[in-house]
Amino acid sequence: MFIKKYGDIIVAVFFILLSAAMIAMALQFPKSAIMEIGPDFMPIVVSSCTLVLGFVLLYLSLRKLRRADAAEQDVKDESDYKRVSVSFALILVYVFTMKPIGFIISTILYLPLQMLVLAPEDKRKKKDIITVSAVSLIFTLVVFLLFRYGFKIVLPSGLFTIQF
């Protein structure tokens, strides 16, 4: 019950402390003599966003805790361990198959499966599966092309690679 009641507050404080530490470490990076933006830029941006979101989560959690009834009612624990276990297994399979079969194939297979595991029961119809698969395909190709040609970062090609 403690984790259920104070879990969001604990997570918020953890991310606030982690973000502050990351900002402090990023500020210790050497400054670039060539460009205005140095190696500290992106870690500071990401850490600052995480810090702001941590404070938002803390504020919302404290507000929700104050609004909670003084008389706590028995709330049925709706934890879904099966979905968490399947999600964890899918992530492990995805990570270990990415190098041998490649980013494109593994991501196109992983994303729809993960989305369907997390989807509510009423959102697992044929139409929803087709939509999820289409979104997965488009998202995977956009990310692949963005990393390959935008950021010049090569993702694992595995069985085949796209040449443009």
Image (tube, rainbow, N blue to C red):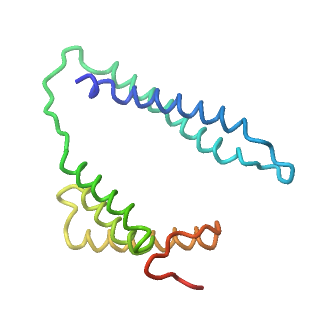
Give above or below for 60 relative to 96.
Answer: above
Q: Residue 62, how many percent across, how many down?
A: 40, 22
Q: Name which residue lies at 37% across and 30% down.
A: 8
Q: Is residue 107 left or right of residue 152?
A: left
Percent across and percent down for residue 154 are: 58, 70
Q: Quadrant of residue 29?
A: top right
Give the x, y percent position of residue 93.
32, 62
Q: Could one spot residue 10 in this view of the protein?
A: yes
Residue located 64% across and 66% down the image: 151
133 versus 85 height, above or below: below
From the top left corner, tell me how far across and down residue 37 is, in percent. Answer: 77, 49
Q: Residue at x 52, y 82 (%)?
A: 162
Q: Which quarter of the rendering shows the N terminus?
A: top left
In this view, which residue lies farthest toward the right? 33
Residue positioned 51% across, 81% down in the render: 161
Residue that sits furthest to the top in the current view: 70
Please tell me which residue lies in front, 59 or 107: 107
Task: Judge from the rendering whether residue 145 lies leftward or rightward of residue 90; answer left or right.
Answer: right
